[in-house]
Image (cartoon, rainbow, N blue to C red):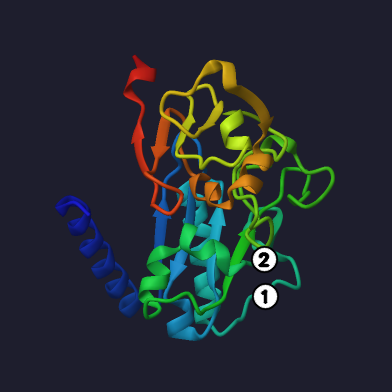
Amino acid sequence: MTEEHAQHDREAKQAIIHDVEKYGCHLALIEADNYLPAFVYTIGLYKKFGHPELICFGLKTDVLASILNHACDLIKSGQTLSSDKPYPGFLQDYNIQLLEADKEYYPDYIGYAGWFNDGNFNFPLLQVVWPDKQHHFPWDENFNPAWKFKQPLLDRNTDFKFYEERNLGVYTTSQALEGDPILYVYHNDDGDWQFHTSDQPNIDDAKLVCLEEITELDPTINELYHLQYGWSAWRKSKDDNWEYEEDIEEKQ
């Protein structure tokens, strides 16, 4: 961790403690990047009120914050939100619904909530889910397909965390399909994915497969669900952590 990162971490933790003491909860806002949508989550609701923490994806951060602030006000007034019914009043003319998030997603999205809750994730989390303009929710057959990946559904698909279709065509090599570890991954500016066992793969060994096949070969590839367009990731072995950087050469 660099000193700049360490300083940011200290300031973030101080802000969380201050806000929970003063307001009853803290909102952590994560802006959208060139690949993933923005999201906002609460910290403090579980410790302060015994209520599940909340998370919401895919809208502008001020709208997301407004939704969760409204929820926090309801909770502070004594209400308990649950996943068994729709709720009006969060978005004008639209209901929202809540999902019980799978704990496997917690480290991916709500790290500071884990820190605040004594360094573990033994608390419930509800995802606030919004509909499309025709009032269809993401699990409905007629939900707007253009919005499918604006809000991942955290109660399912823990085997496949990418913001892509499972049958998306991606590039790899015969060596990876034969069992060699994938050590180099590229998410190109045009959206293409490459998964290689070497930093200099042979074009003659190239294969086109479904993204789901790659995650089935090596479930740890799911750790790269957040890799932005124009970035690459690498590791020394399958047991090592991934490192990341923006691919400057591709942008020149």
Could you tell me which secondary element the residue under label 2 belongs to? strand
Q: Which residue does the image show at 64% across and 25% down from the upper left?
A: 207
What amino acid is found at the position of numbered circle 1 in the picture?
A: Ser
Kindly indicate whether the residue at mark 2 contacts the one at mark 1 (C-beta within 8 angstroms).
yes
Q: At 41% across and 33% down in the image, what residue appears? A: 232
Q: Is residue 199 left or right of residue 88?
A: left
**Label whose residue precedes the other's in the sequence (1 or 2):** 1
- Find residue 179 and report its horizontal and vertical position in percent: 59, 42
Q: Nearer the viewer, residue 15 or 174?
A: 174
Q: Which x, y percent locates residue 234?
A: 40, 39
Q: Position of residue 88 (x, y in %)?
A: 69, 63
- Crowding at dot 2, Cα within 10 Å, few <14 / some 14-19 / many 20+, comes out as many
Say above or below: 149 vs 119: above
Counting every numbered tag in the picture gives 2
Which residue is labeled 1 in the image? 82
Q: CA distance from mark 1 to mark 2?
A: 7 Å
The residue most toward the right is 141
Task: Say which residue label 2 marks.
Answer: 98
| Left or right relative to 182: residue 236 | left
Residue 115 on image: x %, y %: 36, 72
- Which quadrant of the view contains residue 244? top left
Q: Residue drawn at (49%, 80%), measured in percent from left and top?
A: 76
User: Is disc 1 placed on a helix, strand or loop?
Assistant: loop
Residue closer to the observer: 6 or 74: 6
Q: Quadrant of residue 165?
A: top right
Residue at 81% of width from left, 50% of height from top? 140
As shown in the figure, which amino acid type bears the numbered disc 2? Answer: Leu
Is 124 left or right of 109, judged from the image as shown? right
Where, by quadrant of the figure, is residue 235 drawn? top left
